[in-house]
Amino acid sequence: MKKPSLFLKLILPALLLGGCSGGNDAGNATAPASGAKVVIRGSNTIGEELAPKLIAAYKSGHPGVAFDLESKGTGYGFGNLLVGGCDIAAASREANSNELAIAQDRGIALSNIVIGSYSVAVVANAANPVSELTRAQVRDIFSGTVKNWKEVGGADAPIHLFIRDPISGTYLGFQELALEKQPYALNLKTFTNYEGIADAVAKDPDGIGYTGFNLASATGVKGLKVGGIAPAPDAVNKGQYPYARTLRFYVNQAGQSSAARDFIDFVRSSDGQKTLVAAGYVAP
């Protein structure tokens, strides 16, 4: 091997964390047989909420296919994929130079399949006079530096924060994208889903939170422009909206099982994309 230290640095942690084989049957173009299994490793952003919903939708028509899903980060997914430990690496970023170098070393040709975008809309109560914030203002509101609406052009009233629970991928995703990895404010309320946030903001004239795009125009709430850009799928796909991250499936071109290939085809189909959009994500 040309780069043993590089290989060990990326792959050994994946092996120690317990990646498992997906039982690939490359070259089999037939529909997946009952008892087939698809092993997915990788991104929390995909694995916490989106992947379970896509799997459930797929299994409604393929009840005999089993899934093994584990989300410990994008790097964990690549590590498993590059040693044959999974069928699909779920990724919330592109493969980095180290991962591409290891793939080349091992003679692995990676397929990069865009499935959609993780996108978060900042929402306020529909009666709030504030309709637009800068990225700095969003950061300062959710990190607790700005505590009153009058500081950002609104009424003289305390800002009430509503966010996702700390164990969700969205909690970390918004912290990275909007807060520049700064800690969240101390006085806030957490929810296990976007619907809870939207409902809380709709009932609180001084509330602000974040949701999927599908709830940004729910009754009683409004999606705020950020830096002049409204939360809209077109803005995401043009790379204009700031709080968005492209989601991908990576596979070994020479090692796809028929079950994995069929599942990916479903995710990219109109039915799969409807499931993705209904979950608050943006179709490519």
Image (cartoon, rainbow, N blue to C red):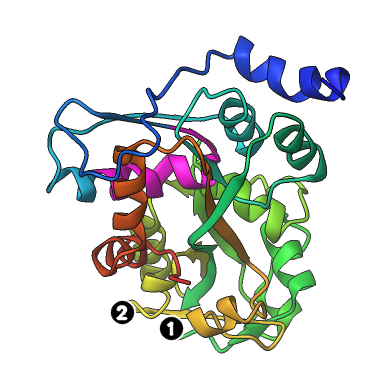
Residue in the image at 36% along x and 69% along y: 203
Q: Which residue is mark 2?
A: 219
In this rendering, position of residue 69 left or right of residue 263? right
Residue in the image at 64% along x and 86% along y: 229
Circle 1 Cα neighbour tier, 10 Å, few/some/many (<14 / 14–19 / ≥20): many
Asked where in the image residue 216 lies, by quadrant, the reply is bottom left
Q: Nearer the viewer, residue 112 or 180?
A: 112
Residue in the image at 22% along x and 48% along y: 58
> Which amino acid type is shown beneath numbered disc 2?
Thr
Circle 2 Cα neighbour tier, 10 Å, few/some/many (<14 / 14–19 / ≥20): few
Q: Nearer the viewer, residue 259 or 132?
A: 259
Report x, y in % for residue 17. Answer: 59, 14
Picture layout, residue 21 above or below residue 96: above
SS at circle 1: loop
SS at circle 2: loop
Q: Quadrant of the N terminus?
A: top right
In this rendering, position of residue 178 left or right of residue 113? right
Does any portion of residue 102 appear in the rendered image? yes
Q: Which residue is mark 1?
A: 126
> Which amino acid type is shown beneath numbered disc 1?
Ala
Q: Disc 1 vs disc 2: Cβ atoms closer than 8 Å?
A: yes
Residue in the image at 75% along x and 77% along y: 151
Picture layout, residue 35 above or below residue 267: above
First reached walking from the N terminus: tag 1 or tag 2 = 1
> Is 22 a magenta residue?
no
> Is 44 a magenta residue?
yes
The segment highlighted magenta reads 40-55
Picture layout, residue 76 above or below residue 267: above
Q: What is the spatial separation of the Cα atoms under label 1 and label 2, in whole angstroms?
A: 8 Å
